[in-house]
């Protein structure tokens, strides 16, 4: 399973069996942030992406879908949703009304224009006063007040999951602050030798990424601060997310490129593919200032060498 630090976007591969039934808390070896990972869901057929920035509403939606025997993956922003669509190609995606970074309408248009995502069904949450572009619209739309019950006829039309015999019950409330939190685990991306350290809460086993994860971040480092210019800062932030994904899914190639000292050349094809998303999201006048993706890749390579 994949775990991503919400602060610096560093990604980790973690063996599912090393995460207990109650999940675990992980400390990022890049920026020292502590974040929670949930236990993996069993693969039971249909898989739906839920893009919703409101955690309580996202919990209601995922709880409802689980009653239909549908596995889910939750993201908070539009850019994260687009990256996940390209990477995993779920059966369907539910796009919230106020996605930061990339609005639902823009996300629907990009998805509709992308041939490899033609089979992904889109359900968009649209406030009543928002105009709809029929040419690139989602397969189905809902108003915020229709969630989650309004999903039932849509799931049946899309033939996703199976209707529960009884009305789905709401998800259980979150633990109160008085309840004990799991012990913090330390997640350190493994070195090239494949060694790992750290223990998951309640599992008694190592909670670190698998040995085949990219050998990065041997020492704790904080990412450089973002630019004071909001547009440049947005470009830097998106470059970090994109490069993190490139390294995660090309770990062996990246590790060899670090040794050879030619990361941008070795990963040129991956940079060009990711550049399409970067071009769609970042204005031309900002992209002309710097080669953000190459700079970020070189920074990550230098961090691994040191």
Image (cartoon, helix red, strand yellow):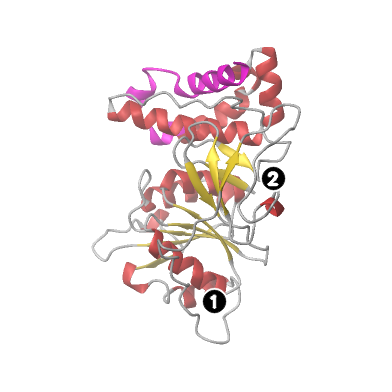
For this orientation, the residue located farthest to the left is 129
Residue drawn at (53%, 70%) of the image: 65
Q: Nearer the viewer, residue 267 or 41?
A: 41
Q: Name the mark on residue 281.
A: none
Residue drawn at (61%, 21%) of the image: 304
The part of the chain drawn in magenta is: 278-306
Name the quadrant of the C terminus: top right
> For mark 2, does the 10 Å Cα neighbourhood hold few (<14), some (14 to 19), or many (20 or more) residues?
many
Which secondary structure dominates the residues rendered in magenta?
Answer: helix
Q: Nearer the viewer, residue 113 or 264?
A: 264
Alpha carbon separation for disc pair 1 and 2: 42 Å
For this orientation, the residue located farthest to the top is 261
Residue 283 pos. (x, y %): 34, 29
Q: Nearer the viewer, residue 180 or 93?
A: 180
Query: Image height check: is 209 above or below 123?
Result: above
- Is 284 magenta? The answer is yes
Residue 113: tell me if it is visible.
no
Residue drawn at (65%, 18%) of the image: 258
Tell whether 14 sits left or right of 193.
left
Whichever of callouts 1 and 2 sits on the residue coming sooner in the sequence is 1
> For mark 1, does the 10 Å Cα neighbourhood hold few (<14), some (14 to 19), or many (20 or more) residues?
few
Q: Residue under circle 1?
A: 156
Query: Image height check: is 54 above or below 190?
Result: below
Q: Residue under circle 2?
A: 206
Q: Nearer the viewer, residue 223 or 144?
A: 223
Query: Image height check: is 16 above or below 241?
Result: below
Residue 27 pos. (x, y %): 53, 40
SS of the residue under disc 2: loop
């Amino acid at each position: 399973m994949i775990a991503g630090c919400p602060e610096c976007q560093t990604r980790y591969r973690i063996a599912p069996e090393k995460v207990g039934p109650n999940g675990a808390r992980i400390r990022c070896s890049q920026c020292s942030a502590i974040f929670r990972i949930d236990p993996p869901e069993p693969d039971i057929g249909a898989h739906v992406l839920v893009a919703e920035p409101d955690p309580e509403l996202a919990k209601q939606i995922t709880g409802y879908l689980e009653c239909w025997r549908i596995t889910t993956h939750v993201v908070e922003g539009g850019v994260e949703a687009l990256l996940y669509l390209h990477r995993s190609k779920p059966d369907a995606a539910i796009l919230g009304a106020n996605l930061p970074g990339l609005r639902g309408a823009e996300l629907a248009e990009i998805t509709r224009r992308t041939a490899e995502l033609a089979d992904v069904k889109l359900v968009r949450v649209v406030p009543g006063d928002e105009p709809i572009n029929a040419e690139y619209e989602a397969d189905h739309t809902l108003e915020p007040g229709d969630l989650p019950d309004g999903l039932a006829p849509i799931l049946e039309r899309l033939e996703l999951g199976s209707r529960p015999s009884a009305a789905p019950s709401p998800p259980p409330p979150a633990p109160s602050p008085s309840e004990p939190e799991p012990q913090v685990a330390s997640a350190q991306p493994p070195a090239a030798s494949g060694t790992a350290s750290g223990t998951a809460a309640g599992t008694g086993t190592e909670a670190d990424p698998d040995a085949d994860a990219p050998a990065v971040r041997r020492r704790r480092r904080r990412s450089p601060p973002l630019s004071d210019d909001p547009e440049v800062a947005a470009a830097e932030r998106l470059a970090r997310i994109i490069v993190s994904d490139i390294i995660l899914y090309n770990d062996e190639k990246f590790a060899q490129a670090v040794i050879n000292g030619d990361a941008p050349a070795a990963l040129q094809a991956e940079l060009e593919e990711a550049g399409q998303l970067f071009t769609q999201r970042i204005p031309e006048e900002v992209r002309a200032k710097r080669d953000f993706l190459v700079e970020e890749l070189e920074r990550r390579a230098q961090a691994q060498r040191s």
